[in-house]
Amino acid sequence: MQNPFLNRVSDPDKSDYLTSACSVNRIRLAKLPLYGIDDEIEGLTVKEFFSVKLVIEEIKMSADVLKIDLSAVNEKKLPRILAKKLDDENSEISSEALRIITKFGNRLGLLFLALKEGVEENRKARDDWNEQHWQYWSQVSDIILVGGLANGKFGEILKERVNYIFKLKNVVPYNIFLYDNSSDVGILGCSTQISEANGVNVVMDFGQTSIKRSIVTKSGGEVVEIKNLEPYPSKYMDWEMPNEEEKLRQAKKLHKYLIRAIEDTYNTAKSTAKTEPNSEIVISIASYVVDGALNANRSGYAKLCSLGKNYAECLWWDLSGRLRKDVIVKLIHDGTAMALNFSDRKNTVCLSLGSYFGIGFPETKLIFPFNKK
């Protein structure tokens, strides 16, 4: 069936783009598909019962049992540390690590089962979906899980629990696929949009919590090296502003910060490779994107719409001046960027387990009409 979460355009010079209805985070489990697993999440939205932040909070509450010194570690690394605790020789520690991951695996399974079955109570709780949206999820065959929580043993346990939940209900499960190095999948997806066959390229990933920076080298049309630089922390990510003046002020701060991050990455690429990087700068961003224009209502990047209708053009203008060359800016919705790695897959959804759920569809067609070169 046609994907109801994609707006397909007849103009061959324009991209498909995701509708805001694609978000998984706003699903509310008004009725659980299975009781006796985690009944406490009934009535909650997905963002209220499954996110990296909630995993981290759970780890913090069990820090004493897990023997984790919270004062000595960056909390963003806690999920990775938790996965290592699965192999701890102390059975109390390994059992607690398994309990936490199992808890969120069960929740993931209940969510997927709810999507598969689409019972009336849950349909009524999602008023921006119609029959087509629920039917789409009922007939999806494959789900590719990416992001930090999908890595290694953490991801394997999540997958096991999803399959276990479906087995308890005697429902045919989605085929769950895990992807190696899935935390870099956005950068890899962006790399597929580099048109130059050779040379050094700047690729960025503007997330809600960090800005990933990468130097991608291509030879003969193939990516031969990806060098990940130290990420920048995401700043100025408040969603709501008291007035338009403050929104514009914060937008200017954020824009200046992003320009600096790109410029630093470009200069690092130039000095490291001892050659001028290519003109294309490919950026995935935690915002719905339509031909370079961002969604004005969602994510911490929404305020950037105050700077102009087309944010790709804003970036082009300032970067071309700062770098003293005419650049090409390609802006991609972050979920779509991840799904680009799987463009040959049919009937497939790509879900990232990051700050919140991100989503992308491999069949999305991308065209970049904004081109000032």
Image (cartoon, rainbow, N blue to C red):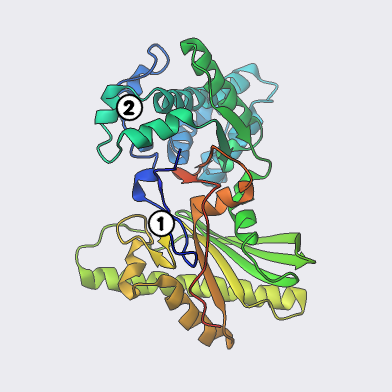
Image point 58% across, 28% down: which residue? Answer: 175
* Quarter occupied by residue 325: bottom right
Q: Nearer the viewer, mark 1 or mark 2?
A: 1
Q: Is residue 157 above or below residue 371?
A: above
Taking the spot 31% from the left edge, 62% from the top edge, the residue there is 296
Is 152 in front, or is 77? 152
Q: Say which residue label 2 marks.
A: 29
**Is 209 located above or below residue 261 in the figure?**
above
Helix, strand or loop for disc 2 = loop
**Relative horizontal placement of residue 187, taking residue 253 as reference (left or right):** right
Q: Is residue 45 visible?
A: no
Q: Kindly report the distance in space between the C-alpha atoms of the residues bearing marks 1 and 2.
A: 25 Å
Residue 194 image point, x, y percent: 64, 66
The image quadrant of residue 307 is: bottom left
Residue furthest left in the image:
243
The structure residue drawn at horizontal position 39% and vertical position 67%, both measured from the top left corner, is 293
Callout 1 environment at 10 Å: few (<14), some (14 to 19), or many (20+)?
many
In this rendering, position of residue 72 left or right of residue 57? right
The amino acid beneath tag 1 is: Tyr
Total marks in image: 2
User: Upstream in the sequence, badge 1 or badge 2?
Assistant: 2
Query: Mark 1 highlights which residue?
Result: 288
Q: Name above or below for residue 286 compared with residue 325.
A: above
